[in-house]
Image: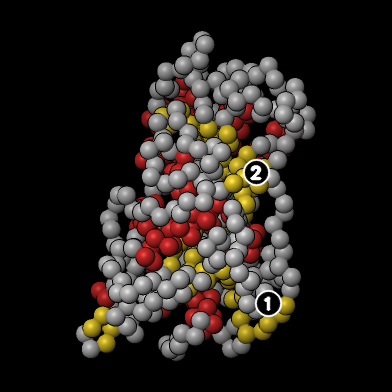
Amino acid sequence: MQARLSPVKTISRVIAGSRSFVTASSSSLRHHHHATNSLRPARALKLSSRPITASLSSHGPRSFHTSTKLGLIRDDQKDGVKEKKDHPFAFAFDIDGVLLLGQQAYPTARRALELLNRHNVHYIFLTNGGGKFEHERVSQLSEKLSLPFSPAQIVLSHTPFRTFAPPSPFPPLLPEIGKIPGTVLVLGGSADKARSVALHYGFDNVVTSKDFLVASPTLWPFATVNNDVRKLAKPLPTGTGPSGELQINAIFIYNDPRDWGLDIQLIVDLLLSHRGYVGTRSPLNGVSTAGRAFQNDGQPTLFFGCDDLLWANEYHLPRLGQGAFKKALEGVWREVTGGAELQSITIGKPFPETYKFAEGVLSHWRNKGEEGTMTGKREELKRVYMVGDNPASDIAGANGYKSEEGTEWVGCLVKSGVYKGGEPEHVPRVVVEDVLEAVRWALEREGVRVEEE
């Protein structure tokens, strides 16, 4: 059974008004009332109740999300006096299928963000993509949209993993797991970037499947061990097991794996091992212990960075994502174990621990950010508009998350990515054509005058 996390507290107040499904066009808004679909139940794990407010921009160029250099003239700049207006709402944007389609910027994305900049409305980027440094991803986004952003504004699928690194200033999201010392296996992404990110997060030792393949090519005899693979591989750390075996304390999927066969084989071996020692088999496999016949002997915890079965790029049909790899692994695991369910922890959207983490990042950006000091007290954050293209992740997460701070998350579904039409499984508050319409709808809902362009 896959572990899902539930927030520590329930929402402290009843949100006024009914949940409604709205289809918006440039000419009209049509309201239809539906019951909000709930997330399927699962075993609850306790999230840390400590606020997560440490800055994400630990390296890389520091930049601002508002800029007069781009010709943005906000309505809070009059007579040469800069008075920042506060708002009780903010935005969280998915990237792929909302702001970008593959490597290309969506036509109205820049205008949507410029509109928020003019009104001094804060926003962050909340994506199930990853496999690179936060500052690299935000730099790429800035280049494609021709707008400056900060690394403190982005949460990648694996950004919350940094809470498990021993020296990280972030409190661990899962107190029952806590910090993870020793050697961890990191999978997914291109080249050797995931290892670099994990080391930057502060993990002691980080290994990849290519390290194991080069050290023992018969591990997955169908792979080609060429010079390119050897260049990416590193020597395995010295083992500490009874016979010198290397122990793996956790397995992290940072991004979509590139060699499914190799990675599935390695994961299955480790989950059948004795206490994560490479090349061993647990004597407890098939023996029911604490209600489990497998993964009951100190094997490494398996983490997935997201659960997206599909995602959108330039191709005209949705593409398989990390969630598809997860489904493949679960199928192999059932066959190998005679029907056992794979025990794993998945973060990313729609899971509540990622929304909790993102809310902390957004709170830090609003209250400190990189814009200087606000005059007066910051108004309480009452609403976050989650703008996404995937009902199963963006909207399911916004609908299901119960903020400990009482903040309401409002799902806004766009038709520019995975979702193309019809009634979605997880009902958003509004369905619009694109990100610009979503921003205009939310601003008008908040009583902010949106000038016609």
- The image's colour scheme reads secondary structure
Q: Position of residue 150 (x, y in %)?
A: 34, 60
Q: Position of residue 129 (x, y in %)?
A: 50, 52
Residue type at the position of mark 1: Ser
Q: Residue furthest top?
A: 243
> With 6 as the anchor, is 356 left or right in this view?
left
Residue located at (48% from left, 73% from top): 89
Q: Cα distance, mark 1 to mark 2?
A: 30 Å
Q: Residue furthest right?
A: 338
Residue denoted by label 2: 3
Q: Secondary structure at mark 1?
A: loop
Q: Position of residue 205 (x, y in %)?
A: 41, 29
Residue located at (39% from left, 60% from top): 364
Asked if residue 108 is positioned above or below residue 100 in the image, the reply reads: below
Q: Quadrant of the C terminus?
A: bottom left
Total number of numbered labels? 2
Q: Quadrant of residue 37?
A: bottom right
Asked if residue 351 is positioned above or below residue 385 in the image, the reply reads: above
One can see residue 12 in this view: yes
Residue located at (45% from left, 49% from top): 159
Q: Secondary structure at mark 2?
A: strand
What is the number of the mark on residue 18? Answer: 1
Q: Quadrant of the N terminus?
A: top right
One can see residue 417 in this view: no
Residue type at the position of mark 2: Ala
Q: Residues within 10 Å of mark 2 (few under 14, many from 20)?
A: some
